[in-house]
Image (cartoon, rainbow, N blue to C red):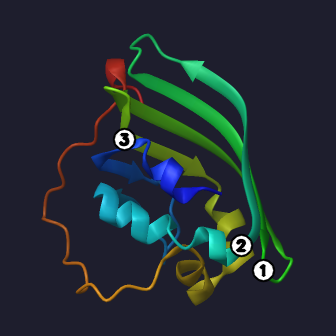
Amino acid sequence: MDVDAALRCFAEDGTQEMPFAPPGFPDRLDGMAALRRQYGGLPEAYADMRFDVSAVRPMADPEWVLLEYRGRITQRDSSRYDNGYAGLFHVVDGAIVLFREYFDPLVLQRAFGGDRLAAAFTLPTTDPPATDPPATDPPATDPPGGDR
């Protein structure tokens, strides 16, 4: 998996939201540094990783598209993590500004469990710990018509 190529698809201030993220897994990544910290170590962490797109569903507003896809991951210990996904993308001027990803958190937890979950997806960092988010989060960007 070419993480750098995937990250080049995002705007510098792009956001990924994961509304069904289990405990121990981030539910939001804001900006390129957070995305890179989350995904930069994936090629070394897995023996094989691929995502097969099964459906592309354009919306009335051409800046929005919904993808359905299946992740097929072989871990270094030969165990598997396979999950189904739906990703809602908001693309402005050719760059992803929002990626809202839906997946089955129980499948994720069964594959990784506990501390192994966070370690499997996150690069080690020497950055200071993140501060708590403000008391009121900015509203999420929603697709046209307000439907999520």
Q: Is residue 129 visible?
A: yes
How many residues crowd mark 2 within 10 Å: few (<14), some (14–19), many (20+)?
Answer: some
* Residue 98, numbered circle: 3
**What type is the residue that disc 1 sits on?**
Arg
Secondary structure under the numbered disc 2 in the rendered image = strand
Q: Which residue is mark 2?
A: 46
How many residues crowd mark 1 within 10 Å: few (<14), some (14–19), many (20+)?
Answer: few
In this picture, is 36 found above or below 75?
above
Looking at the picture, how far across and down is residue 43, in whole percent?
A: 64, 69
The picture quadrant where one finds residue 121 is bottom right
**What type is the residue that disc 2 sits on?**
Tyr
In this picture, is 60 found above or below 130?
above
Secondary structure under the numbered disc 3 in the rendered image = strand
The residue that appears at 43% across and 43% down in the rendered structure is: 99
Which one is earlier in the sequence, the residue at label 1 or at label 3? 1
The picture quadrant where one finds residue 105 is bottom right
Query: For this rendering, which residue is in front, 92 or 100?
Result: 92
Which one is earlier in the sequence, the residue at label 1 or at label 2? 2
Query: For this rendering, which residue is in front, 137 or 55?
Result: 55
Dots 1 and 2: beta carbons under 8 Å?
Answer: yes
Q: Which residue is mark 1?
A: 76
* Residue 28, numbered circle: none
Residue 71 horizontal side relative to residue 59, left or right: right
Query: For this rendering, which residue is in front, 120 or 40?
Result: 40
Looking at the picture, how far across and down is residue 51, in whole percent?
A: 71, 47
Quadrant containing the N terminus is: bottom right
Residue 138 horizontal side relative to residue 114, left or right: left
Looking at the picture, how far across and down is residue 66, in whole percent?
A: 54, 29
The residue that appears at 31% across and 89% down in the rendered structure is: 126
